[in-house]
């Protein structure tokens, strides 16, 4: 497969209703300059703090073993040997799924206790031959291993049983939504939007599972999606250049960029519009009591206010909790998660409204907020990012 391929990987999660902490734990990392991603979903027995501890230990072991270049299958065996069995229920204290994918298309998947993953290609669910193993020392627990050869457009979707068992006990779903129902839901959205992002697809699936639980999640609910695709590039311009003589160069960054563009900041948007000989108009559809409204510039995907919007976007990335209404921060959040390679260009001209000249430059608000956004994008959502100062 062409090495220009990008592996988008993202997830969405909801806690069991009444709990403040999830018993599902999702960990991930991008390695070898983005050429390989490793993802782990562990589902601790029960819910709440105890389940979270059990799942955290399992997920951390799995991630450390696999990223430490221990073969995926061998890593799963070590976890199985170390993972205790609940004496009452006779099941593992934590179920787990391990996905190890590289840009050449090789995707290795190990599962124990979680619902079987779903492999989607060309709008269809393909059957996958898995090798099942059990050992006397594992007390009838089954370890499942599969290896796929993926190509552009392929998706691997894996999830905790909070999704497959959503709605269990209700007249419509006496045994829960089920893997087949989940698959039909996924295919429906992919056929309507063949390029739907991993971030959006995982969110839609989790939201639907909660809906099937009558709006109150009956268990911790987690879904992760791996999507092989051409990378989507985003340029974020924020803050005016330190030297006004570079305004023209700054505006031309937007003119020459291939991909999506976001401009964050009133002065920034005026510079870009002036240098591109375009106008800035206020968007009356995004009026919000908390976040300043967005604007429109021809050829620019999103134009927002600066520091307040960036700060709120960082909060959304950290919590994953959206307010349920559309504003500049939620639109920037969506654009960031729909993109794969994100380039931030940060102007360093001092804005007296946000800067105390007596403080070190490193404490300047805009820089710190952008750095926080970059860290969250890299650590939580496996995006490739860069920051340049001008």
Image: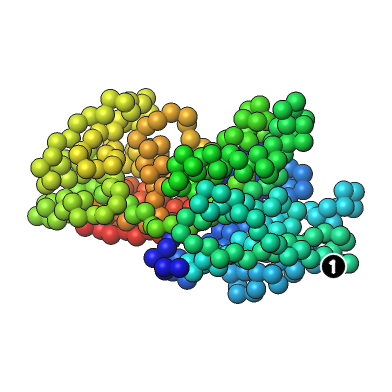
Seen in the picture, residue 143 relative to 347 is either above or below; the reply is: below
Residue occupying image coordinates x 63% and y 33%: 210
Task: Answer left or right for 174 relative to 370.
Answer: right
Residue 243 visible (yes or no): no
Instruction: Count the numbered circles shown.
Output: 1
Q: Nearer the viewer, residue 157 or 352?
A: 157
Q: Position of residue 328 (x, y in %)?
A: 34, 35
Task: Answer left or right for 113 relative to 263.
Answer: right
Residue 240 visible (yes or no): yes
Residue occupying image coordinates x 28% and y 42%: 301
Q: Nearer the viewer, residue 270 or 222?
A: 222
The answer to which quarter of the image holds residue 140 is bottom right
Q: Quadrant of the C terminus?
A: bottom left
Residue occupying image coordinates x 28% and y 47%: 261
Label 1 CA crowd tier, 10 Å (few <14, some 14–19, many 20+): few
Q: Position of residue 278 (x, y in %)?
A: 13, 39
Q: Secondary structure at mark 1?
A: loop
Seen in the picture, residue 381 relative to 64 is either above or below; the reply is: above
Q: Which residue in the structure is indicated by mark 1?
A: 135
The answer to which quarter of the image holds residue 387 is bottom left
Q: Position of residue 24 (x, y in %)?
A: 67, 48
Seen in the picture, residue 290 relative to 162 is either above or below; the reply is: above
Q: Nearer the viewer, residue 262 or 164?
A: 164
């Amino acid at each position: 497969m062409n090495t220009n391929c990008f592996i988008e990987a993202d997830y969405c999660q909801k806690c069991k209703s009444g709990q403040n902490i999830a018993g599902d734990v999702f960990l991930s990392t991008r390695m070898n300059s983005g050429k390989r991603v490793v993802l782990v979903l562990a589902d601790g027995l029960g819910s709440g703090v105890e389940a979270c501890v059990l799942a955290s230990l399992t997920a951390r072991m799995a991630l450390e073993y696999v990223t430490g270049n221990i073969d995926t299958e061998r890593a799963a065996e070590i976890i199985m040997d170390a993972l205790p069995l609940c004496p009452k229920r006779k099941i593992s204290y934590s179920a787990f799924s391990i996905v190890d994918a590289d840009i050449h298309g090789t995707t290795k998947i190990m599962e124990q206790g979680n619902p079987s993953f779903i492999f989607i290609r060309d709008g269809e669910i393909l059957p996958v031959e898995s090798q099942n193993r059990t050992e006397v020392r594992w007390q009838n627990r089954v370890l499942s291993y599969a290896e796929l050869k993926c190509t552009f457009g392929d998706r691997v979707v894996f999830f905790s049983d909070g999704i497959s068992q959503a709605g269990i006990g209700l007249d419509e779903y006496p045994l829960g939504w089920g893997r087949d129902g989940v698959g039909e839901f996924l295919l429906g959205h992919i056929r309507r939007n063949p390029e739907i992002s991993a971030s959006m697809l995982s969110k839609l699936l989790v939201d639907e599972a909660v809906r099937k639980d009558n709006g109150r999640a009956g268990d911790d609910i987690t879904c992760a999606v791996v999507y092989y695709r051409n990378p989507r590039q985003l340029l974020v311009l924020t803050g005016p250049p330190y030297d006004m003589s570079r305004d023209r160069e700054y505006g031309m960054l937007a003119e020459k960029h291939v991909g999506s563009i976001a401009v964050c900041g009133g002065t920034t948007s005026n510079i870009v519009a002036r240098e591109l000989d375009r106008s800035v108009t206020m968007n009356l559809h995004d009026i919000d009591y908390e976040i300043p409204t967005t604007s429109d510039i021809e050829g620019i995907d999103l134009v927002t206010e600066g520091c307040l919007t960036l700060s709120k976007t960082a909060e959304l990335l950290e919590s994953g909790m959206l307010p349920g209404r559309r504003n500049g921060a939620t639109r920037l959040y969506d654009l960031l998660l729909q993109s794969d390679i994100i380039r931030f260009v940060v102007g360093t001209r001092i804005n007296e409204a946000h800067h105390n000249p007596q403080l070190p430059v490193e404490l300047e608000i805009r820089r710190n907020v952008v750095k926080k956004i970059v860290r969250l994008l890299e650590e939580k959502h496996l995006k490739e990012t860069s920051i340049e100062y001008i």
